[in-house]
């Protein structure tokens, strides 16, 4: 039973990462004054977040964080997306994103798949 639940949870984690990027893009499209600012923020905010996640949070990241650093990265990455949705007058979506992320991270840790070792290390090639 553990294996199918793990597959579902990891799939949900990926969808939540995409939802966070979408939330940041939505925030960008509603922030700033003028069309240029809307378009620029809608593109730049998710790109910056994706670059940071790709460097430190993704499974094949060059500097995959673990332990407290990983938790801090998840709080900042997903928390900024939830906060952005709140700021963009989408509090229900922000709350749903935050609650779903918290539940899924807890489930991954319970299944033994959370990055809980206390160090960071470069990815193995």
Image (cartoon, rainbow, N blue to C red):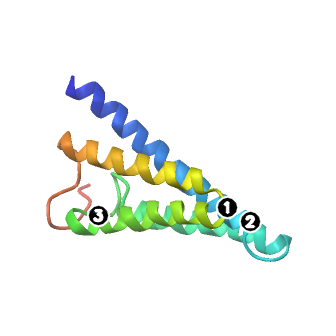
Tell me: 49 left or right of 70.
right
- Expressed as whole percent of the image width and height from the top left, the position of residue 9 reads 34, 37
* Residue reaching furthest to the left: 118
The one of 46 and 68 positioned closer to us in this rendering:
68
Q: Quadrant of the C terminus?
A: bottom left
Q: CA distance from mark 2 to mark 3?
A: 30 Å
**Could you tell me which secondary element the residue under label 1 belongs to?**
loop
Q: Quadrant of the N terminus?
A: top left
Circle 1 residue = 89
Of callouts 3 and 1, the N-terminal one? 3
Circle 3 residue = 70
**Could you tell me which secondary element the residue under label 3 belongs to?**
helix
Residue 7 appears in the figure: yes
Q: CA distance from mark 3 to mark 1?
A: 29 Å
**Which residue is at a point 82% across and 73% down the rendered structure image?**
36
Tell me: 47 left or right of 1.
right
Q: CA distance from mark 2 to mark 1?
A: 9 Å
Residue 64 appears in the figure: no
Circle 2 residue = 30
- Expressed as whole percent of the image width and height from the top left, the position of residue 110 reads 19, 43
Task: Evaluate if marks 2 and 1 touch, with contact meaning CB atoms under 8 Å apart.
Answer: yes
**Which residue is at a point 35% across and 39% down the rendered structure image?**
10
- Expressed as whole percent of the image width and height from the top left, the position of residue 18 reads 53, 49
Instruction: In the rendered structure, find residue 77 and report the number of the disc placed on it.
Output: none
Tell me: 17 left or right of 46.
left
Q: Quadrant of residue 44?
A: bottom right
**Could you tell me which secondary element the residue under label 2 belongs to?**
helix
**Which residue is at a point 40% across and 44% down the rendered structure image?**
13
Neighbours of disc 3 within 10 Å: few (<14), some (14-19), many (20+) = many
Q: In the image, which is nearer the foreground, mark 2 or mark 3?
A: 2
Neighbours of disc 1 within 10 Å: few (<14), some (14-19), many (20+) = few
């Amino acid at each position: 039973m553990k294996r199918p639940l793990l597959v579902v949870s990891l799939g949900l984690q990926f969808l939540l990462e995409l939802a966070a990027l979408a939330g940041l893009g939505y925030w960008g499209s509603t922030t700033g004054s003028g069309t240029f600012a809307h378009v620029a923020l809608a593109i730049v905010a998710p790109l910056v977040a994706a670059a940071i996640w790709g460097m430190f949070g993704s499974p094949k990241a060059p500097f995959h964080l673990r332990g407290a650093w990983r938790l801090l990265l998840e709080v900042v990455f997903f928390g900024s997306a939830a906060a952005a949705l709140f700021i963009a007058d989408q509090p229900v979506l922000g709350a749903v994103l935050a609650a779903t992320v918290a539940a899924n991270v807890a489930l991954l840790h319970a299944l033994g798949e959370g990055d809980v070792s206390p160090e960071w290390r470069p990815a193995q090639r």
